[in-house]
Image (cartoon, rainbow, N blue to C red):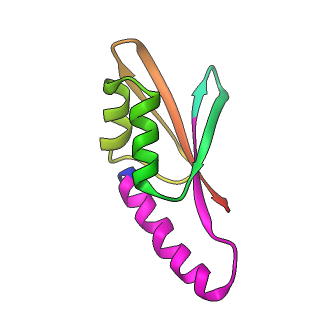
Amino acid sequence: MTMRELFKKIETYNEIAHMMGTDKARIYFYDIGDGISLGGEHFDDYGIFRKYVKSEYQKEIADKILKADCWDFDKDFTFEWAGGTATFSAELTAA
């Protein structure tokens, strides 16, 4: 699924969590370099995530992150680009 679809799931869950008065969910998106996390950010809104990706990464990488349809929670996504390979992950976390 795409990152937009992952965020739709978070949005739906958070609507129910709000009614139930329980913890909300968010996505911790991070860059993996040489097998270790190079840092990341937490997001619960696709629009903010999209702006972050477009500002932090070169267009080629940002487009692959935003358009890829192989995302899933807690699974790494590796792709090749002109500069080599890049690996990212989107973890499901509590807010």
Residue 56 position (above or below residue 47): above
Indicate the quadrant containing the C terminus: top left, top right, bottom left or bottom right. bottom right
x and y, in percent, of residue 29 in the image? 56, 43
Residue under the image location 42 percent in, 14 percent down:
84
Residue under the image location 35 percent in, 19 percent down:
81
x and y, in percent, of residue 42 in the image? 60, 49
Q: Start and end of the magenta stretch?
A: 4-30
Q: Is residue 85 magenta?
A: no
x and y, in percent, of residue 28 in the image? 60, 48
Residue under the image location 43 percent in, 48 percent down:
71
Residue 72 position (above or below residue 62): below
Residue 82 placement, left or right of 43: left
Residue under the image location 63 percent in, 19 percent down:
34
Magenta region's main secondary structure? helix
Indicate the quadrant containing the N terminus: top left, top right, bottom left or bottom right. bottom left
x and y, in percent, of residue 85 in the image? 44, 20
Name the residue nearer the viewer: 83 or 23. Answer: 23
Residue 42 placement, left or right of 70: right
Residue 64 position (above or below residue 3): above
